[in-house]
Amino acid sequence: MPQAASNPAGGVAAASPWDGVAERLRASGLRWTPQRRTLVDVLREHEGHVTATELIARCRERDQTTTPSTVYRTLDVLEDFGLVRHGHGPGGREEYHVLPDQVHGHLYCVACGATWEIRPETGAAIVDALAADLGFDVDLSHVTISGRCQTCRD
Amino acid sequence: MPQAASNPAGGVAAASPWDGVAERLRASGLRWTPQRRTLVDVLREHEGHVTATELIARCRERDQTTTPSTVYRTLDVLEDFGLVRHGHGPGGREEYHVLPDQVHGHLYCVACGATWEIRPETGAAIVDALAADLGFDVDLSHVTISGRCQTCRD
DNA sequence: CACCCTAGCGCAAGACGTTGCAATAGCGCA
DNA sequence: TGCGCTATTGCAACGTCTTGCGCTAGGGTG
């Protein structure tokens, strides 16, 4: 279970966290396949949130033969490397956070459908509250909490 | 969209919230069918949390011809009446809270698989924190938050 | 009590995820 | 460079949940 990259590679331009993936995989006895390259290429231009379905679609644009199971399995591997993080949207659908620099929670407005990020300080307060209550070590990023945003409450 | 029952019925024994369902449905122009009766009978003995799958299975025990779509649709109706409340478990699976007397959030320990209820006060603190931050009116009960319980953290 | 309107039912198909298995192909090694 | 081990792939089938559609039957009405 590798740690997040600390960017060696003595490169020139600002190295993308994705640059060393192939080597990192191989270093762990895993393999660098065309399918994985395709998915990583797609993820490269998707810093943010994406649904699994959308990723599969984008991969298929580049490689007609892309199979869902392969994408899901590769995402699992990338998650082990800390490159993506999965969660569940309001409908329970799979959702991926690409390159989670800082883990954050999400809010979904059931009225307007917009999603919002929980500010780190607020998230920390929530985590602390649950730690104090039940001693739970909560991972807020795994789920999207539903509710109504300020505008829609009126 | 009816409100929660206020238990009239001037009955004898402590009336179950389920007792008036048939009448309540009819009063709204909806119907009381054998399929709905079956589901309500099952729910009656299930105060707590149940997955949709489990409900379907239990209904089928009583009526071999039970169809998933009917169960899901009936649950939607019952939710409108405030008799059940649905949410999504850690795997994104549908989960129902029967007779949600007080709305509460849930925690799931990814290590041991146990689930815990968030105490009302703690839940309120979380809701308040998000209200103060983004003005969000959060519905904590819709999702199960993941993490590690005190025991599993060690 | 028979009639009619329409809510609800069962079916079939589809979207999203997961899993077992046999065949394929990375890639480390000689 | 060629070989062999085994990580991965793609398929197929399954489980969960949703949706469209034509037929059925609940139940209010005359």
Image (tube, coloured by chain):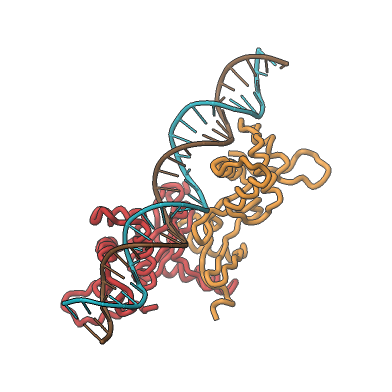
Chain colours: A orange, B red, C cyan, D brown
Determine the image quadrant of residue B44.
Answer: bottom left
What is the quadrant of the N terminus of chain B in the image?
bottom left
The one nearer the camera, B129 or A148, is A148
The one nearer the camera, A74 or A11, is A74
Determine the image quadrant of residue A63.
Answer: top right
Residue D26: % across, % down: 26, 71
Give the number of marks. 0
D28 shown above or below A95: below
Describe residue D22's horizontal placement relative to residue B11 as left or right: right
Residue B117: % across, % down: 40, 61
- The residue at the far right in this view is A12
Which residue is painted at 59% across and 67% down in the image? A114
Describe residue A150's horizontal placement relative to residue B79 as left or right: right
Residue D23: % across, % down: 33, 62
Which residue is painted at 54% across and 42% down in the image? A69
Which residue is painted at 33% across and 68% down in the image? B99
Q: Is residue B126 visible?
A: yes
The one nearer the camera, A130 or B97, is B97
Residue D25: % across, % down: 26, 67
Describe residue C8's horizontal placement relative to residue A94 as left or right: left
A73 shown above or below B7: above
Q: Is residue A127 visible?
A: no
